[in-house]
Image (cartoon, helix red, strand yellow):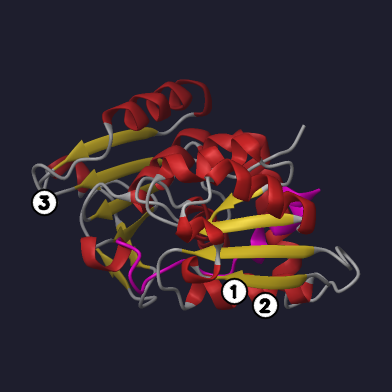
Amino acid sequence: MTRHLLTLDSLGRDGILVNMELATHLKSVKGMTRDALAGGRVGLIFDKPSTRTRVSFEAAAWGLGMLPITLRPDELQLGRGETIADTARVLSRYLSALAIRTFDQAKVEELARYATIPIINALTDDHHPCQALADVMTLQEEFGDTAGLRVAFVGDGNNVCHSLIQAAGYLGFTLAVSTPEGFEPNPAIVEAARANCLVNGGAIEIGHDVSTRSWTRSSTVRSLASGTRQRTAGTPSRRCSMRSSPARNAGSAWDEPPAHKMIRRIIR
């Protein structure tokens, strides 16, 4: 059965942990394992502009011994009326895997339905699993383990937020989300993650006020972006914060760190 990465639900807890272990190894060798998937071919469809996603996927494919083939919408028959199903079938004959950065989650899921090769979600309006995996790896590098962490996400309930919510449900950390009113994350995604928290630990908290007392009881606040640390009053615990803005995560020019953290696992 072909394995896809459509959301973090595609991996589950065990799959995420395996990917993190593999990612750590690949990072230690600078992503250079040229014999790992020698002769493979990865198609990259970008319906949205991309800097980091395109470069990281191409660099990762080359580092694994694969040929990256970047495809723009205006270069495909898909942009002229060919169905997603036909495109999936045709590309499956030529490629080893296909990554796509697009708008509708339904488009990625339809590609996966008809493809016989792995489909990787490189960003949609609803999910950003590659970004969440990279964020989780950063948490592991900073704190050693994600279980028991308290992570604050400030911004709109967007694709990154959804994927981090799923990650929290599988990995046992608490994700405290603060959004503007009317920009909350999808309730179905939140409830599914909370059900996973009952098994794996952690919690999902949704609010609109970043000054809420229950969110500021940590003794240590670390900014992952700047690496600075400050002390606040309260009981000791581990906490970090992630900030998001609708403009940065809408997909126009902001995308995830290197995706080689997962390609080999998904294809194999």
Asked whether disc 2 touches disc 1, contact meaning CB atoms under 8 Å apart, the reply is yes
| Amino acid identity at mark 2 | Ala
Sequence-earlier tag: 1 or 3: 1
In the displayed structure image, the side of residue 227 where residue 232 appears, left or right = left
- Checking the image for residue 56, the label placed there is 1
The residue beneath circle 3 is 211
- Please state the horizontal and vertical placement of residue 186, each as a whole percent of the image: 28, 35
How many residues crowd around disc 1 within 10 Å: few (fewer than 14), some, or many (20 or more)?
some
| Amino acid identity at mark 1 | Ser
Q: Is residue 213 magenta?
A: no
Q: Nearer the viewer, mark 2 or mark 3?
A: 2
The residue beneath circle 2 is 59
Q: Is residue 254 magenta?
A: yes
- Please state the horizontal and vertical placement of residue 125, each as a whole percent of the image: 35, 50
- Checking the image for residue 236, the label placed there is none
Q: On screen, 243 above or below 238?
A: below
Label 1 – label 3 distance at C-alpha: 36 Å
Sequence-earlier tag: 2 or 3: 2
Q: On screen, 28 above or below 132?
A: below
Residue 148 visible from this viewpoint: no
- Please state the horizontal and vertical placement of residue 4, each as a whole percent of the image: 64, 42
Q: Nearer the viewer, mark 1 or mark 3?
A: 1
In the displayed structure image, the side of residue 251 where residue 182 appears, left or right = left
Count of all numbered marks drawn on residues in the image: 3
Give the residues drawn in magenta, as a range.
250-268
Q: On screen, 168 above or below 220?
A: above
- Please state the horizontal and vertical placement of residue 9, each as a whole percent of the image: 54, 34
In the displayed structure image, the side of residue 205 where residue 166 appears, left or right = right
How many residues crowd around disc 2 within 10 Å: few (fewer than 14), some, or many (20 or more)?
many
Asked whether disc 1 touches disc 3, contact meaning CB atoms under 8 Å apart, the reply is no
- SS at mark 1? helix
